[in-house]
Amino acid sequence: MSDVYAESTTGADPTDPATLARYTTLRLGGAAGRLETATSADEIVHRVQEAERREDPVLILAGGSNVVIGDRGFPGTVVLVRSRGLRVVGEDADTVTVRVEAGEPWDDLVAATVANGWSGLECLSGIPGSAGATPIQNVGAYGQEVAETVTGVQVYDRTDGSVGRIDAADCGFVYRGSIFKYSDRWVVLSVDFRLARSPLSGPVRYAELARALGVEVGDQVPLADARATVLRLRAGKGMVLDAADPDTWSVGSFFTNPVLELEAYELLRERAADLGEPPAWPGAGDVVKVSAAWLIDKAGFVKGHPGPEGVAISSKHTLALTNRGGTASTAALVALAREIRDAVHDRFGVTLHPEPVLINCTI
Ligand SMILES: Cc1cc2nc3c(=O)[nH]c(=O)nc-3n(C[C@H](O)[C@H](O)[C@H](O)COP(=O)(O)OP(=O)(O)OC[C@H]3O[C@@H](n4cnc5c(N)ncnc54)[C@H](O)[C@@H]3O)c2cc1C
């Protein structure tokens, strides 16, 4: 099967069709015990139920762009989510609500909303993966996150075998997280997004994006301009998938930006006093979000820093750990992640946490 999702032959045993390296953007990960493709919501439910009947562990895999799978793979059933489609399920004079099947490629959806004059997803252009995975970690970039537009998620609940809806208010959306992340309970079947009927983007919140667009923070710009500029900025950082560029063979940012209590933030400032002010943004409540990229860079890991056996920090972005091809393995990748995490902790007393979901491996 060939589609927009990662399907590479670089990785452990490329001759084995069940090798999960073929289905992850890192191009790493051992074999699945059993690999099944589901092309509709009903089929996703059916595949999961069948695996449950066999008492087989289940891994839901879509674009494979936010998972790190161990070299020994997954000794159960991997269900590849490949359902497609979107339809309008609600509209009024100002908004339109679209229901998007879980396997719909995310960036195809964003492109369609921009083309239709539906505003709310444009700054999330160029993010790999599926629409169904976006609620999992409340996908966000350039000042937008899906929590602002998701109104509800249709799910299969593995605890009681029911299919139902979880309203956005009950999704527990936080920075790069939700009730779905690290939980096997729910399988996302489709997601509803409410978007504004507008030829203009939402107010641009991200200073770098505003600069690149030549506008002030808070201004609105034509949707197509926002999308094109986000794509250009992302490409410059290796954050748009490119099969020919190993700087993009990653999970995007490997670590989240640490969210610190004020006391911990003051301690960081003291420990970093010789380096200038650590870049930081106010979080919700009495917390401060600090730049993981800055901490990593100041702990001595520059862009391109090599790790063991064919893995390295991207030459375009300090936060992306990449597979350079050849003998790369998940063991090498997590060893590099561990080295970075420990060095940042030793230097600044701040613990970095991985953003992707780790499967049968740990840092
Ligand atoms: C180059 C690059 C840039 C990136 N940039 C960003 C960015 O700017 N912002 C951002 O937030 N993320 C970013 N990411 C991370 C990633 O693209 C997103 O998290 C994306 O939403 C993951 O989608 P996926 O379909 O690939 O999920 P997968 O990697 O297939 O799965 C991720 C997790 O979600 C679970 N899952 C997937 N689908 C379902 C489902 N239907 N039901 C239940 N569970 C499911 C999986 O079991 C796994 O735990 C980037 C990744 C790369 C490689």
Image (cartoon, helix red, strand yellow):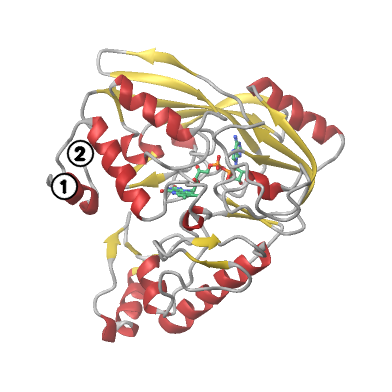
Check the picture and name the quadrant holding the C terminus: bottom right
Q: Is mark 1 within 8 Å of ligand 1?
A: no
In-front residue for pair 15/362: 15
Name the residue tied to disc 1: 217
Q: Quadrant of residue 195?
A: top left
Marked residue nearer the N-terminal end (1 or 2): 2
- Name the kind of residue labelled 1 in the image: Val
Q: Is residue 304 left or right of residue 271?
A: right
Secondary structure under tag 1 reads loop
Residue drawn where x is 20% and y is 29% of the image: 200
Q: Position of residue 88 (x, y in %)?
A: 42, 15
Q: State the SS at label 2.
A: loop
Residue 238 or residue 76, whichever sits in front: 238
Seen at 51% across and 74% down, the residue is 340
Write down the residue under mark 2: 203
Characterize the local packing of mark 1: few (<14), some (14-19) or many (20 or more) Cα atoms within 10 angstroms: some
Q: Contact (CB < 8 A) between labels 1 and 2?
A: yes
Left or right: residue 257 versus residue 115 is: right
